[in-house]
Amino acid sequence: MKKMFLFGLFTIASVFGLQSFGDNNGSKPTIQVDTVCFSRDVLPILNSNCAMSNCHDAISHKDNYILTSYAGIVKGVSPGSSATSKIYNQIVNNKMPENPYKKLTTEQKAIIKNWIDQGAKNTTCVVTNCDSVNVSFSTIKPIITNNCLGCHNGATAFAGIDLSTDQNIEDLKDLILCTIIHATDCKPMPSNGLSLTNCDKSMVNRWVQLSSTGNIQSGEQIVRSFNVTPNHVTESAVIHFQLDKRQSVMMSLYSYDGRKIRTISTGDYSEGNHELPFLANSLSSGVYFIRIQVGNSIQSLMFTH
Ligand code: HEC
């Protein structure tokens, strides 16, 4: 009974917190409380808690288990029966993850159990009503807990990155954003070739932008006051920047994974403030960045669409 209650609480929390089905356009949010979705709910938990190097990643594949994909995970599962599933038994009895790795939480165990009992299907879910505008720390925390914490907690902090405290998540937010959008200046996370959903990326991006400039910069800062308004762009926006003297400027649009989409503007701009109109209506929804380059100085500004 207690378990059921806890799980109930969690599913409600995940609908309003992790998933944050927003109500952007006044429509009623769609809530599917019961169905566990493999790619969104199960894979990140097993990847981050079991597929670290030395354990069940593709290189180490301990006991022949590679827990970074559906094919590898389903080998340790009896669809429809958590009770006879090897992976679930190891987890529920706290045999795995082995010490010193963090055990799974009650909520995470319940997700794995429900997924197996529901037939252990290879499901992907499309988040149709992603609210990447009304974002706060409590929206971000479950994303980190389920996708990152297994490899980045106090006892097991790969690369010295410990994301087990709220303060550390706050302090490292620019680097976290850099890793999850697979920007070129940092290592792509969450490791093993996986990616967060576009919705999760947009939410983290928005959260970082709310509390900082959202700028990634390399080289001397030549361009000032670089920003885009609004920074959740629906159709059109205005890009602002300021120069201390006349400069030759190159501005381009990039996808979150670093592909150049188009040149926005190139040419000489005079000293002072500039505003450029920007149309986003041909873009699919997701995270993008605008890169402005003057000589060796580059700044990238992220926005969501
Ligand atoms: C399966 C284990 C694993 C998972 C899951 C994982 N990481 Fe990592 N992380 C690593 C390892 C290993 C490194 C060191 C990478 C290297 O040096 O090649 C690392 C490095 C990092 C770094 C430092 C990057 C840099 O360029 O200095 C950050 C920040 C980070 N991870 C954040 C995250 C975030 C955020 C998540 C969740 C979205 C995550 N990690 C999920 C294993 C993991």
Image (cartoon, rainbow, N blue to C red):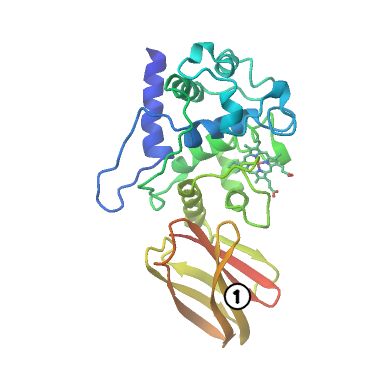
- Give the image location of residue 115, x and y in percent: 46, 24
Residue 138 image-quadrant placement: top left
- Give the image location of residue 153, x and y in percent: 64, 33
Residue 279 image-quadrant placement: bottom left
Left or right: 108 in relation to 159 = left
**Callout 1: helix, strand or loop?**
strand
Above or below: residue 80 compared with residue 226: above
Q: Residue at (61%, 68%) from the top-left corner?
A: 299
Q: Nearer the viewer, residue 299 or 96?
A: 96
Q: Tag 1: Cα neighbours inside 10 Å, few (<14), some, or many (≥20)?
A: some
Q: Nearer the viewer, residue 236 or 149?
A: 236
Q: Residue at (38%, 17%) from the top-left corner?
A: 4
Question: Ligand 1: does it lie within 8 Å of the C-beta at label 1?
Answer: no
Left or right: 5 in relation to 297 = left
Quarter the C terminus occupies: bottom left
- Give the image location of residue 246, x and y in percent: 61, 87
Above or below: residue 12 compared with residue 140: above
Residue 137 in sight here: yes
> Which residue is label 1 attached to?
223
Quarter the N terminus occupies: top left
Q: Image quadrant of ligand 1?
A: top right
